[in-house]
Image (spheres, rainbow, N blue to C red):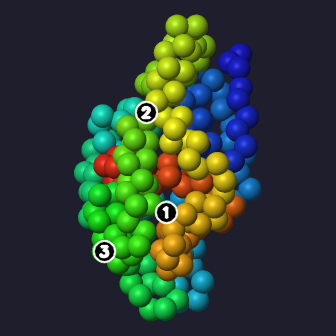
Amino acid sequence: MPKKIAIIGGGIAGLSAGCYGRMNGFDTEIFEMHTVPGGVCTGWKRKDYIFDGCLHWLTGSAPSNPFFKIWEELGAIRGKRIVNHDEFSHIVLPSGRRLVQHADIRKLVGSLKKEFPEDSKALDILESDVMKLGDFRRPEGSAGPIGLFRKIRGLLEFSKYMPVFSRYPGSMTDFTARFKNPELRQFFMGILIFPDMPGIFCVSLLAMLTTGDSGWP
C-alpha cells in the first residue's frame, strides 16, 4: 500500500506538492476550503467588476532560473510563450500624480529620480541592493538532505548578501521611511501593499519583479 500525503490548501504550493508527491509514488490528497482550487491565483466578480487575483507575472520565468525547471515539470509553462512587458502598472497617488512601475529596476529608479531628485541617493542604494538580490539563487536540486560541504558552500555564498539584509531590519513602513518625499513613500506602499511586511522582503520582491526573471505565461 503506497504511503499517503495529506496536503492542507489547494493553492499553487499545495497543488505543486500534490503533483510532486504523485511523481514520487505517493498517494496524495489535497484539502481546500474553497469551492475551486488555485488559492490567491483565482478571481471573482462583484456586480460589474472582476477582481482578478490570477497570474499576472510568474517568478522564475527565465530559463537560467532554477524555478524555470519546476514550472516546466509542473506543466505551468510548457509550450507557452513568456511575455516580458516594459511596465507592470501605473500608480495614481492621492494628489492625482501618476507614476509608472517599470519592469526593469534601472528604468524604475531612473524615472523616480527624475520625479524625486531629493531621494536620488536612497534610490541609488535601493537599485544596487535590488540588483544584488536579483543574482541570489536557491541552488538547483537543493531539496532533500544537504551534506556538510553543501552547507558550508551555501553559507559562504549567502554571506555575500548579508550587507544587503542588514540594511533592511524593520518593516515595510521602515523601508519607506528612508525616502524624504511622502509621495515616493506612497508609491512604494502602492506597489508593495503590506505595511507590516519585513523590509528585506520588499527589496526581495522588487528583485523578483524587476531583474528579468518575471514574465507572463
* Picture residue at 58% right of the left edge, 89% below the top: 47
Q: Is residue 214 visible?
A: no
Q: In the rendered view of the protein, which quadrant contains the N terminus?
A: top right
**Image coordinates for residue 207, horizontal then vertical, percent:** 42, 50
In front: label 3 or label 2 = 3
Query: Which mark is drawn over residue 137?
Result: 2
Looking at marks 3 and 2 on the same chain, the residue that comes earlier in the sequence is marked by 3
Residue 107 visible somewhere in the drawing: yes
Q: Which residue is mark 1?
A: 54
Q: Which one is closest to the eye, mark 2 or mark 1?
A: 2
Residue 37 picture location, percent across and down: 60, 54
Camera-side residue: 33 or 91?
91
Residue under circle 3? Answer: 114
Residue at 44% across, 60% down: 122
Q: Is residue 185 above or below residue 127?
A: below
Does the residue at mark 3 contact the one at mark 2 (Cβ under 8 Å)? no
- On the image, the x and y values in percent for residue 35 come to 67, 61
Which of marks 3 and 1 precedes in the sequence? 1
Q: Secondary structure at mark 1?
A: loop
Q: Amino acid at mark 1?
A: Cys
